[in-house]
Image: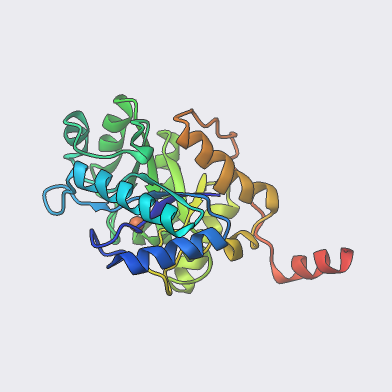
Amino acid sequence: MIDLHAHILPGIDDGSPDLDTSLKMAEIAASEGIKKMVATPHFIPKEKEQEREKVLEKVRELNCVLKEKGIDLEVYPGEEVFLSPEIPELLDEGKIITLFDGGKYLLVELPMMSIPPYALNIIHSIHLRGVTVILAHPERNREIAADVKRLRDFIRLGVLVQVNSLSLLGVFGSTCKKVAEKIVREGMAHIIATDCHTARSRSPRMKKALSMLDGRTGHILTVENPALIMEGKKIEVPKEGYKARPIGLVRKLAMFFRV
Ligand SMILES: [Fe+2]
């Protein structure tokens, strides 16, 4: 699997505080079957702007230690950028790191409480620059949680939707879990990533969340689509999206007895 959203770099944002924690997170990720991970520290325009070189250096350093320790995980550069009107200009200036530093896909997060009125216009401007927006964990946005159909406006613009595995596992509460399940069930999710921050409650866990989906959809959302993104290729999303079938208890039992 390829995890496109992770706060694994030590001491750079609210994710891993130190190298020890980063290594523990990497070990968990590897044991979950994650082979590649994009480090996506928070980038908040005007408030917390990461220095490009510093992020790239930290990725290089972490990869060296992972190799030394024999941990089977490769880390790539990226950022999680807070949606704001400055993004197109920052992209033009080369100040923001896209996923894999490939210039094709940008991970963008909405504020928790609302959808800013300029959201769709800014996303359109980003797309005009040949960069596709991946919307990070929309299930955590309060307006979308109240009405998931609002996501359709983003998807119509060509936005890809990333749901957190930890949301599906209920780490952010039952409402967030239900919203995440609904997004996945209705075919509006294109990627599942961990958004891991720690080696504890917000560790890079994927397997259990995937066991809640049918295998084919899980594979597309965690392996195939992330691989296309890594290669900078376009993802042809089917018209109806990826209609995942979350596996409920009844179905799990049925599957169990069928064996
Ligand atoms: Fe994040």
Residue in the image at 60% along x and 39% along y: 240
Q: Is residue 227 above or below residue 45?
A: above
**Total numbered circles:** 0
Image side of residue 3 versus residue 101, left or right: right
Q: Is residue 7 above or below residue 200?
A: above
Residue 40 % position (x, y): 33, 50
Residue 220 % position (x, y): 60, 43
Q: Is residue 258 above or below residue 184?
A: below
Residue 68 % position (x, y): 42, 55
Seen from the viewer's position, the closer of residues 253 and 52 is 52
Residue 196 visible to the viewer: yes
Pick out the residue farthest to the left: 46
Specify the color scheme: rainbow
Residue in the image at 67% along x and 55% along y: 245
Image side of residue 36 versus residue 116, left or right: right
Pick out the residue farthest to the right: 258
Image side of residue 234 versus residue 54, left or right: right
Q: Quadrant of the C terminus?
A: bottom right
Q: Is residue 69 above or below residue 250?
A: above
Quarter of the view holding residue 22:
bottom left
Quarter of the view holding residue 224:
top right
Residue in the image at 33% along x and 31% along y: 103
Seen from the viewer's position, the closer of residues 219 and 25 is 25
Residue 239 % position (x, y): 58, 34
Image side of residue 195 versus residue 48, left or right: right
Residue 109 visible to the viewer: no
Seen from the viewer's position, the closer of residues 83 and 52 is 52
Quadrant field for ligand 1: bottom left
Seen from the viewer's position, the closer of residues 38 and 105 is 38
Quarter of the view holding residue 143:
bottom left
